[in-house]
Amino acid sequence: MSRVLVTGGAGFIGSHLCDAYLARGNDVVVLDDLSSGNERNLAAALQTARCELVVGDVRDEVLVQSLVERCDLVFHLAGRIGLMLVVQSALRTLATNVEGTNVVLRQAAKYQRKTLVASTSEVYGLSKEFPSREDGAIVIGSPEKNRWSYACSKAVDEFTALAYHREEGLPAVAVRLFNTVGPRQSARYGMVIPRFVSQALRGEPLTVYGDGTQTRCFCSVGEVVAALTKLVEHPGAVGKVVNIGNPEEVRIIDLAHRVIAATNSQSTVRFVSFDEAYEANFEEIMRRVPDIGRARELIGFSPHYDLDAILREIIAEQSEMSAQGTSAPR
């Protein structure tokens, strides 16, 4: 069986991807600096000798070369995530995301390893074309606002991956993820569903940024991981950008009330301005919804795990951890 390299494999999505490949009988090598990932996410995976964790920086060219050389397939998920971290340090966001991706792609091209680069729906920015299509325009805001450093860095990652494909024959695919959610996801960096669930279970007010009328779409991590494994194996995906997400939209204020109901919580809702939550003159993306026609055509992607099922899963995880006296996922 082939050996799979997962950068950022100790993170939320990465650890589930590792589990999927181990279940298929593959060997897995994880590269993670554990800055936002957690070795605890790999607890089950590391029980087997077929999973190896290498703690290191994805920008370390010598290290990345040694790992890519002995692996057959590369998933590049490492990067700086979460708007809280992005706003705090745009410089580190750009350095980690752009430089790290360059290193991985350069080594993948050297050894001609099939590579999947994880990107984000953030790249659509302020575009008003809905649902968002991969061949549509992207509208990134002013560089005077830190939040756009993340979208910009991931757009550069996509351009770089496709440039390596066109110019050096690298079999690469870029995937734009729309709010993946599920077990192991941390509330630490502002991820809305685990944050709401944590607040509701503690009986605290659920903090809704802005007026809550912005919409998001949430897709189960299990369905996302299944899609990633299929896309990286599909020859028709090479050289393309592909949206992965669930087109079911929900307003954030409505999400808050659904979480309160699902947890039988006495929590209320507290509104916090974007400027207070992030930075002055913060620009919010008011609507995000994916066009998944390309993914459907390529791999038959059609998510069926609805939001209520996702909420039940996350509530069960956090409730169990609370009962055991352990902390929620980092």
Image: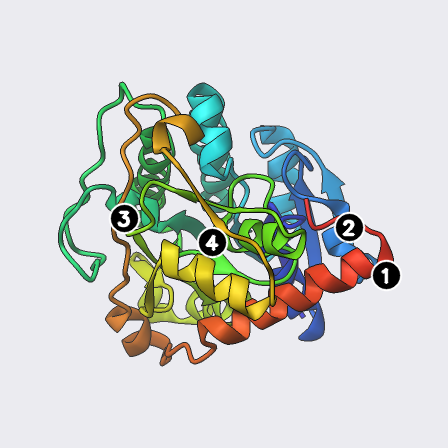
Q: Above or below — where is 281 with respect to 140?
A: above
- Mark toward the start of the polypeptide (2 vs 4): 2
Q: Is residue 45 visible?
A: no
Q: In whole angstroms, how far apart are the C-alphas of marks 2 and 4?
A: 26 Å
- Mark toward the start of the polypeptide (4 vs 3): 4
**Residue at position x 77%, y 50% in the image:** 40
Q: Is residue 316 visible?
A: yes
Residue indicated by mark 2: 40
Residue 244 is situated, as x and y percent measured from the top left of the image, at 37, 64
Q: Which mark is residue 166?
A: 3
Residue indicated by mark 1: 47
Q: In whole angstroms, how far apart are the C-alphas of marks 2 and 1?
A: 12 Å
**Residue at position x 27%, y 48% in the image:** 166
* Dot 2 alpha-carbon crowd within 10 angstroms: few under 14, some 14 to 19, many 20 or more: some
Q: Nearer the viewer, mark 1 or mark 4?
A: 1
Q: Amino acid at mark 2?
A: Arg
